[in-house]
Image (cartoon, helix red, strand yellow):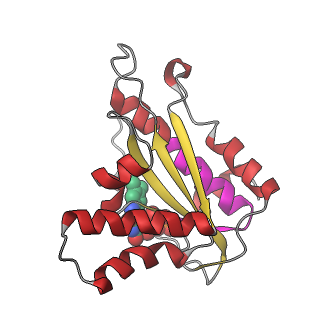
C-alpha cells in the first residue's frame, strides 16, 4: 500500500479478534509511533501494552474506578467495566508523558505529539492489515486509573488503542467536501 493510499483510507475497526499482533508487527507499530513530531525532542510518549492477564488487570482497575466513583455500584456495572477490555486481544495505552514547565513546549504541544504517536499506531496497524480502534472513554480521565497506570500529575492518557485481527468489514469511508474545511488566504 503506498503512503497516500494509507493516509486516505485508514479506517477504524471495532470488531477485533485474536491473536494479538506479533512481535515483528509490534516493532513496526512502535517505530511508526516513535516518528511522531516532537518539539525539542522531549519524547513525550509512554506506551503500556496490555494482553492476556494484563487485560484482566486493566479491567480490575476500571472496576476499581467504578467502585470508587460509586461504592454502591452493582455487580453488573462492575462486570461491564471489566468486560469493556475483552473487545480486543491487545490494548495499547498511549500516555502523554509531559515535561512540566518547559518554556518552549507547552503541555498542549506535548499532548498533541502523543496524539500523533497514537495516529502512527493506527496507520501502521492499517498498513499491516490489522484492525485498530482509538478509544478513550471516562476511564482515560479517571483518577484511580491514572494512579494505577502510574501517571504523574501533568501526564494524560491520550488513547486506549484496541488492536487485533479484523473481525469484520471496514465501514465505507466518508466523503468529505474539502472546501468546507479549508480557507484560503491568497
Ligand atoms: C481522542 C479520541 C478518542 C476517541 N474515543 C472514542 C471512544 O471512546 N469510543 C468510540 O467509539 N470512538 C472513539 N473515538 C473515535 C474512533 O476512534 C474513530 O475515529 C471513529 O469511530 C471514526 O472512525 P474512523 O477512524 O474509521 O473514521 C475517539 C477518537 C479520538 C481521536
Residue 7 seen in render? no
Residues rendered magenta in the picture: 115-133
Q: Quadrant of residue 83?
A: bottom left
Q: Is residue 132 magenta?
A: yes
Occupied quadrant, residue 84: bottom left
Magenta-drawn stretch, dominant element (helix, strand or loop): helix
* Side of 174 where 130 appears, left or right: right
**Residue 36 highlighted magenta (yes or no):** no
**Number of numbered labels in the structure image:** 0
Q: Residue 81: horizontal and vertical position, in percent?
A: 37, 74
What residue sits 69% from the left and 77% below the top? 18
The image quadrant that residue 142 belongs to is bottom left
Residue placed furthest toward the front: 71
Closer to the camera in the image, 46 or 105: 46
Image point (73%, 54%), residue name = 26
Quarter of the image with the N terminus is: bottom right
Which residue is located at x 47 percent, y 44 percent? 95
Instruction: Report the quarter where the C terminus lies.
Output: top left
Q: Is residue 103 left or right of residue 115?
A: left
- At a point 40% along the width and 30% down the height, the residue shown is 109
Amino acid at each position: 500500500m503506498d503512503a497516500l493510499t494509507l493516509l486516505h483510507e485508514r479506517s477504524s475497526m471495532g470488531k477485533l479478534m485474536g491473536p494479538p499482533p506479533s512481535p515483528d508487527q509490534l516493532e513496526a507499530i512502535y517505530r511508526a509511533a516513535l516518528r511522531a513530531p516532537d518539539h525539542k525532542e522531549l519524547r513525550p510518549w509512554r506506551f503500556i501494552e496490555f494482553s492476556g492477564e494484563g487485560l484482566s488487570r486493566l479491567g480490575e482497575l476500571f472496576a476499581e474506578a467504578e467502585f470508587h466513583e460509586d461504592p454502591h455500584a452493582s455487580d453488573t456495572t462492575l462486570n461491564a467495566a471489566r468486560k469493556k477490555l475483552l473487545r480486543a486481544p491487545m490494548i495499547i495505552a498511549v500516555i502523554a508523558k509531559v515535561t512540566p514547565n518547559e518554556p518552549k513546549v507547552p503541555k498542549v504541544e506535548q499532548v498533541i505529539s502523543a496524539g500523533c504517536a497514537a495516529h502512527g499506531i493506527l496507520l501502521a496497524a492499517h498498513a499491516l492489515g490489522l484492525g485498530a480502534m482509538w478509544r478513550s472513554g471516562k476511564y482515560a480521565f479517571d483518577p484511580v486509573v491514572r494512579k494505577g497506570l502510574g501517571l504523574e500529575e501533568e501526564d494524560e492518557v491520550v488513547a486506549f488503542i484496541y488492536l487485533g485481527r479484523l473481525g469484520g468489514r471496514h465501514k465505507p469511508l466518508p466523503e468529505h467536501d474539502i472546501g468546507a474545511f479549508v480557507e484560503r488566504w491568497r
